[in-house]
Amino acid sequence: MTSEKPSFAQAMGRKNKKPEADDGAFTILIAEDNEVNLKVMQALLSKFDAKLLLAKDGRKAVSLFRTRKIDLILMDINMPLMDGLEATKEIRVIERENGAAQTPIVAVTAHVKPADQHICIAASMNDYLHKPVKDDDLKRTFQIWAPGLSFARPAKDAGAVSAA
């Protein structure tokens, strides 16, 4: 018997609030309100073997987190309705309430000052990428937070599911 904390999906399943069926795919939630940034991120992520979920504000990101199996979150900081910092705090509360392990949350922002990075980490984000995101930076981030994620995906499907 292991002493590891259950995943969010396992914890939620025990409370009869099961996330959408797990098809085994590594799932990345992109929380980004800017269409251009979203398209850039989707293009970069199309090189990875992952299912993508899209949220255009922090409130939708939290809602998707409650109902879907999410393996990693790329969170913009400045979004309407609820910013990325507040969304991260809400997600961390959900995880604690359900005894679930933390889902890696990576801030993705145009704010590049060291103080901005500290604000993101203080909000319980795990890492920080600045815009424009570069392919090599994304790969390094995934090596840390998603080490099993393959760098190649079939060209037939970008794997994005819009959930705006």
Image (spheres, grey):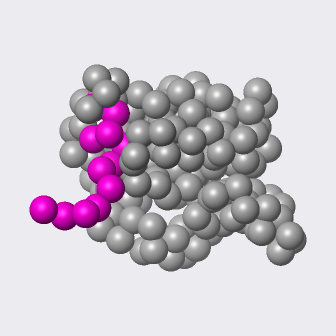
Residue projecting furthest to the left: 1
| Left or right: 5, with 164 as reference point | left
Residue at 33% across, 49% down: 7
> Residue 9 appears in which quarter of the rendering?
top left
| Left or right: 63, with 9 as reference point | right
Residue at 60% across, 28% down: 60
Residue 94: percent from left, percent from top: 51, 38
Residue 156: percent from left, percent from top: 30, 44
Residue at 52% across, 71% down: 141
Q: Is residue 62 magenta?
A: no
Name above or below for residue 6 compared with residue 22.
below
Q: Is residue 4 magenta?
A: yes
> Residue 149 appears in which quarter of the rendering?
bottom left
**Observer able to see residue 152:** no
Q: Nearer the viewer, residue 1 or 41?
A: 1
Residue 116: percent from left, percent from top: 83, 64
Quadrant of image for the N terminus: bottom left
Residue 159: percent from left, percent from top: 37, 41
Point out the stretch of residues depicted in magenta.
1-13
| Left or right: 71, with 73 as reference point | left
Name above or below for residue 55 compared with residue 107.
above
